[in-house]
Amino acid sequence: MSTTNTSSAASVAWIGLGAIGTPMARTAAAAGFPVTAFDLNPAAREAVADVATPATSAREAAQGADVVVVMVATPAQLDSVLVGEGGIAAVLTDATTLLIMSTVGPAAIEQTLTTLEGISSHVVDAPVSGGAARAATGDLLVMVGGADADVAAVRPLLDALASNAPVVGTKPGDGQRFKIVNQLLCGVHIAAAGEALALADSMGLDLEQVHEVLGTGAAASFMFADRGQRMVDGAFDDVRSALTIFVKDMGLVAEAAQEVGQDVPLATSAQGIYQRGSELGWDRRDDSIVYEVLRGRTD
């Protein structure tokens, strides 16, 4: 995480204080950026009041800000932030850079550009990967799409939030395309970890030993290490990444694949597993609960 001279730091409006948005906002403030923050949940706003100025609406937060960061969960939420009640489109100007760090898919970015025609052309698409722990230390991967000048305007903030923030394309939407590939891999890896451990359990193996031994060999992966440990521990209510995120993201993968005519059979299979978990009412539980889905459990 880099630090910035407070006197020269861009003012930041932060909209969306969820599991990752909150530590990101705190990291930005710790790096010297003056942050005004908004979330629909008053408790979330109060939770960052020691480092950021709470706002009563997204519009109030965005008024006069140099950079407006949006870190919400879905395309519908992004649209609401822009043009819903208290939406920010009314106060954006061509001096504002809109930094969309949510995973919402390229279609939502295209809609945003259309919505902002004649209001602001400065949009940077920069979805993140890495989770809440890495967000708190400024160690995220950020996949950045946008015009050179717009990216340059937000580069100090990106460098404070991420250990790696490569430009992956020159137009907004390119970051989302990269993130879709990232989520395909993550979603399949989590499902594969769940399937492997479910098989191990069904064969009567010691899950802790399976996780420890296989985690040292060619089968190791970040998701097997991280989500696999949660599966072994049964820590499904210690929610670090909710199942609903992968229900949404694997849907974005499916949409993108259909648009370009690419067959994604592993992603399709994994999507079905997440959807089954959702149908069991487990949306707000940790995504490692796919292990329980694969073991055929329902409560």
Image: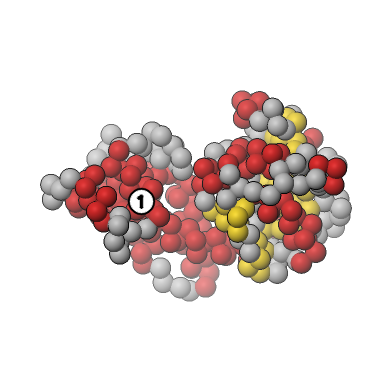
Identify the image quadrant of residue 29.
Answer: top right
Residue farthest left in this picture: 204
Q: Residue at x 33, y 48 (%)?
A: 228
Q: Residue at x 19, y 51 (%)?
A: 200
- Badge 1 crowding class, 10 Å Cα cut-off, few under 14, some 14 to 19, many 20 or more, is some
Q: Position of residue 207 (x, y in %)?
A: 22, 46
Q: Residue at x 57, y 65 (%)?
A: 177
Q: Is residue 216 visible?
A: yes
Specify whether 22 is left or right of 205.
right
Specify whether 224 is left or right of 33.
left
Q: Is residue 14 visible?
A: no
Please tell me which residue lies in front, 137 or 260. 137
Please tell me which residue lies in front, 179 or 81. 179
Please count the marks in the image: 1
Quarter holding the C terminus is top left
Specify whether 46 is left or right of 204.
right
Identify the image quadrant of residue 279.
Answer: top left
Please tell me which residue lies in front, 2 or 56. 2
Q: Which residue is mark 1?
A: 225
Q: Position of residue 100 (x, y in %)?
A: 67, 52
Specify whether 84 is left or right of 278.
right
Image height check: is 65 above or below 179? above
Q: Position of residue 233 (x, y in %)?
A: 30, 38
Image height check: is 37 above or below 157? above
Give the amino acid type for the residue marked by disc 1 in the picture: Ala
